[in-house]
Image (cartoon, rainbow, N blue to C red):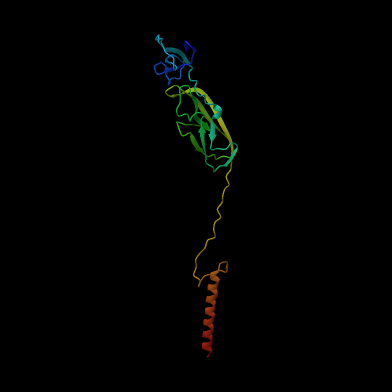
Amino acid sequence: MTTTKGEQKASVKWDVKGSSYDPSSAERQIFNVKGTVILPDGVKNPNKISTVIAVSITVNGYQGTEAAASDNKITGIDSNGKYDTNTKITFTAAGAGMDNTNPRKGDTRYQPKSWKITETRTWDGEPYTATFRVSKPGKYTLKVTFGQQKYDGSSWKDTGTQSESTVTFTVSQAAVLTATPSPAVTQTNQKSAVQTGDSTPIMTFVIILIVAVVCIGGILVYRKKKK
């Protein structure tokens, strides 16, 4: 400010709240702000010169945070990973900007929309996770489609732009396990049991015993008559 002793620096108390500035708006704004000059120590204003001033201020609009499609990720499945036909694979699609919990107008993000190996499957909402198992050996590619969305100040809207992320993996035939049957064990009476591995027919012993009894009986009869 100009005084009788030359130029001097002075503070200004600005009334931003009294202006038309809207801090919640993401649009470009031009507005005036009034302020009152605070006289430095020793400076008087006997002529009552107005100490109110005003300036014009331009605030550029918020451009929005642009999510990069290159930041879209597929986690839980290894790129060029090797699995077998018994393996259940669980993966998660992580879209860029999906962690923006306090969006402003103009912000963008990529929402997971669908995934495909042999057939297309879609997500209706979070969590963007799926589990699958491949029954046929071979080389496969998991493809996830992300849709770009833009925040309009109240909700997220699809822009029509899409991005795809892929992971290639290999599935081999799982080993087939064959069970070996255990030998049958039969409990027997030790007094009358035939030893394991004895292949002699039991009826043979029975016939021999009968013949022996008959022979003994014949000898006894013969001796009795002879006397």
Q: Position of residue 51 (x, y in %)?
A: 42, 12
Q: Nearer the viewer, residue 189 or 202?
A: 189
Q: Nearer the viewer, residue 142 or 49?
A: 49
Q: Nearer the viewer, residue 47 or 28?
A: 47
- Counting every numbered tag in the picture gives 0
Q: Position of residue 130 (x, y in %)?
A: 49, 36
Which residue shows up at 54% across the image and 77% down it? 211
Q: Residue furthest bottom?
A: 227
- Residue 74 vertical position relative to residue 51 in the rendered view, above or below: below
Q: Residue furthest top?
A: 47
Which residue shows up at 55% across the image and 71% down it? 204
Q: Position of residue 134 (x, y in %)?
A: 54, 39
Q: Position of residue 26 (x, y in %)?
A: 45, 20
Which residue shows up at 53% across the image and 82% down it? 216
Q: Is residue 39 left or right of residue 200?
A: left
- Residue 195 vertical position relative to residue 140 in the rendered view, above or below: below
Q: Is residue 139 left or right of residue 111?
A: right
Quarter where residue 72 is shown: top right
Q: Nearer the viewer, residue 117 or 69?
A: 69
Q: Is residue 157 left or right of residue 86?
A: left
